[in-house]
């Protein structure tokens, strides 16, 4: 993770409500960064073996209007918080490990104790299928494989033509469910050299012989009363007034 001094003007403070899970020398910081049409509300931590950023877009604090970050916003946050040569991931977990404390929040992860396994470049993708999203939108799926890694490249079609935007998180979740199922994990990378194309994203399935590091589900939020008693919902977003440092 980068030195974050360049973000001091957006720094809102340290989150003490995460302190019982923090290790010595680690942090949990809160930022609010201007964005197109709203503000990016972020929590950034580097404890328990992970650099972790999760955030949502705040459209209106008074009316409590939020939305999920776009792919472009995810890339912007990756560039703000991580070096260009660092690889980070978004995780589509198994259904049994899925935690959804806020339907508008997305996460970026990077293990800080081990190297993140990187897939090889795939030279050739074969067109596989079309997945219907709604009456006008379909997802074009292409499949590639190399070194035991399987990749599904996803692009968006509207009325049968490619459009100039990347798939949304919900569209990638639909593709993952239809292609891989809910009982397996899939990974989306933000990494140099793994650019899929200007308007596509890729779901990666690691080989079985790779022990791929995945964050513990409780780092995302509670799932049941037992978790709540132990963790007390440590990392929920709290409402507050936003003030930018000029």
Image (cartoon, rainbow, N blue to C red):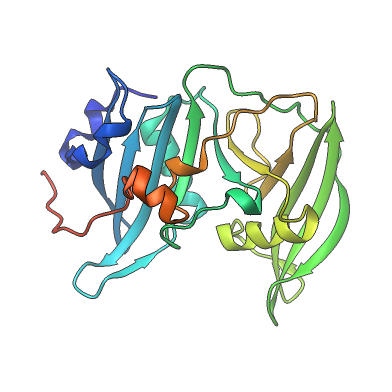
Quarter of the image where one finds residue 192: top right
Q: Residue at x 46, y 21 (%)?
A: 112
**Image location of residue 181, percent across then percent down:** 76, 55
Q: Residue at x 65, y 23 (%)?
A: 117
Q: Quadrant of the C terminus?
A: top left
Q: Is residue 134 above or below residue 7?
A: below
Q: Is residue 140 above or below residue 85?
A: below
- Residue, far bottom: 135
Q: Nearer the viewer, residue 17 or 29?
A: 17
Q: Residue at x 49, y 35 (%)?
A: 109
Quarter of the image where one finds residue 101: bottom left
Q: Nearer the viewer, residue 83 or 176?
A: 176
**Image location of residue 25, percent across then percent down:** 27, 18
**Image location of residue 68, percent across then percent down:** 44, 60
- In the picture, measured across the screen, residue 60 lies left or right of residue 158, that is left
Quarter of the image where one finds residue 64: bottom left
Q: Nearer the viewer, residue 215 or 7?
A: 215
Q: Is residue 40 above or below residue 116?
A: below
Q: Quadrant of the N terminus?
A: top left
Q: Could you tell me if residue 199 is visible in this image? A: no
**Image location of residue 195, percent across then percent down:** 64, 37
């Amino acid at each position: 993770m980068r030195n974050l001094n360049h973000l001091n003007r957006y720094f809102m403070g340290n989150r003490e409500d995460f302190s019982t899970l923090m290790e010595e020398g680690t942090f949990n910081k809160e930022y609010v960064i201007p964005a197109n049409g709203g503000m990016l509300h972020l929590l950034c931590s580097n404890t328990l073996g992970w650099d972790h950023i999760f955030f949502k877009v705040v459209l209106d604090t008074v009316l409590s209007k939020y939305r999920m970050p776009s792919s472009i916003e995810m890339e912007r946050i990756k560039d703000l918080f991580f070096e260009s040569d660092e690889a980070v991931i978004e995780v589509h977990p198994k259904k049994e490990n899925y935690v959804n404390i806020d339907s508008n929040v997305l996460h970026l992860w990077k293990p800080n104790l081990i190297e993140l396994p990187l897939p090889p470049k795939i030279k050739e993708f074969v067109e596989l299928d079309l997945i219907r999203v709604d009456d006008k939108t379909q997802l074009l799926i292409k499949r590639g494989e190399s070194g035991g890694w399987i990749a599904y490249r996803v692009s968006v079609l509207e009325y049968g033509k490619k459009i100039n935007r990347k798939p949304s998180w919900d569209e990638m979740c639909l593709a993952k469910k239809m292609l891989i199922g809910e009982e397996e994990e899939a990974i989306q990378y933000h990494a140099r050299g793994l650019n899929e194309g200007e308007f596509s994203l890729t779901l990666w399935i690691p080989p079985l012989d790779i022990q791929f590091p995945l964050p513990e589900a409780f780092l995302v939020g509670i799932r049941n009363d037992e978790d709540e008693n132990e963790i007390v919902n440590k990392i929920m977003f709290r409402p507050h007034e936003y003030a930018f440092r000029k």
